[in-house]
Amino acid sequence: MTFKFIQVNIYKGKYLDALVNFLKSEGPDFISMQEVTVGGFNLCEDRRANLFAVLRTRLAMGGVYNGDLKLMGDEKSIFGNAVFSKCKILEKNVVVLKEFRPVTLEELDGVSGEIREKIPRHLLDCVIDYYGKNIHLLSWHGAWTAPPVDTKETLGQAKIVANYLQSLDEPFILGCDANNVIGSETIALVNDVSENLMIDSGVLQTTHPKVHKIVPRGFLIDYVFVSRDIRLKSLRVPEVLVSDHLPVVCELEL
């Protein structure tokens, strides 16, 4: 049987209604997301909303969430990763990649970006029951550098991710905004233990060509990695305004 998986960094809900409409029109079985926020981090109209709860309700899907970055002075405001599934969720696991203190919005969104490589990061693993077979659906937001380069931090976090994937004895699908490019050593670490579906895909960039802060430059930094028992049937990256990143839409077969 085939199923649809979508990877998307949702840009703190900046284009929330368009995102929901796009995802409903695609009808994915599974979604991995990054920059899923609560409260003061939000860029959507409702600055108090829990975007994970809103999306779970509006998409009518089950899901898991982990928020690890907190807002200084308002620790109910959080920033993290999510996974959504139409299948029964059996288990949730969180692998800590980086710990750090709460931050201010000025630090997070500042021009210098000095804080970005230091902020908390994790790998979120959601185990689902796919017609009697366990599959791991994972979401990861890689350490951020500008421009994307290999650093001790990006390599260290990618190594933890790769080791975790290698430890799994069941099929897996990892969607991520890895914040690094396809020829980097950081991405190569994950390539060694999985199939990188972006290789030879013909996709040149996943940052939105009109609204991402690095325009007119563009980078391919969003990926889908799968275990070797999952086969790619199709992959596309539609240019839709649902985020400052473009979604990666995959048809897959176990």
Image (spheres, rainbow, N blue to C red):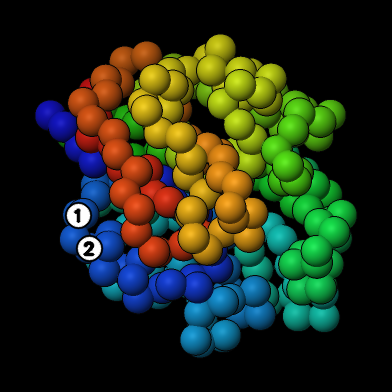
Residue 31 image position (x, y, % from top left): 36, 49
Q: Which residue is mark 2?
A: 24
Q: Which residue is mark 1?
A: 27
- Residue drawn at point x = 58 percent, y = 76 percent: 42
Q: CA distance from mark 1 to mark 2?
A: 5 Å
**Does 80 sit left or right of 100 as displayed?**
left
The residue tagged with tag 2: helix, strand or loop?
helix
The disc at residue 151 is none
**Does 7 sit left or right of 156 as displayed?**
left
**Does 7 sit left or right of 154 as displayed?**
left
Can residue 227 be seen here?
Answer: no
The residue tagged with tag 1: helix, strand or loop?
loop
Residue 252 image position (x, y, % from top left): 24, 30
Please state, as top left, top right, bottom left or bottom right, where the C terminus lies in the image: top left
Residue 241 vs 146, above or below: the answer is below
- Residue drawn at point x = 33 percent, y = 71 percent: 18
Toward the viewer: 7 or 61?
7
Figure quadrant of residue 38: bottom right
Amino acid at pointer 1: Gly
Toward the viewer: 63 or 149?
149
Residue 84 image position (x, y, % from top left): 36, 53
Identity of the residue furthest to the left in this view? 1
Figure quadrant of residue 233: top left
Contact, mark 1 vs mark 2 (Cβ under 8 Å): yes
Can residue 165 be seen here?
Answer: yes
Residue 103 vs 249, above or below: the answer is below
Amino acid at pointer 2: Lys
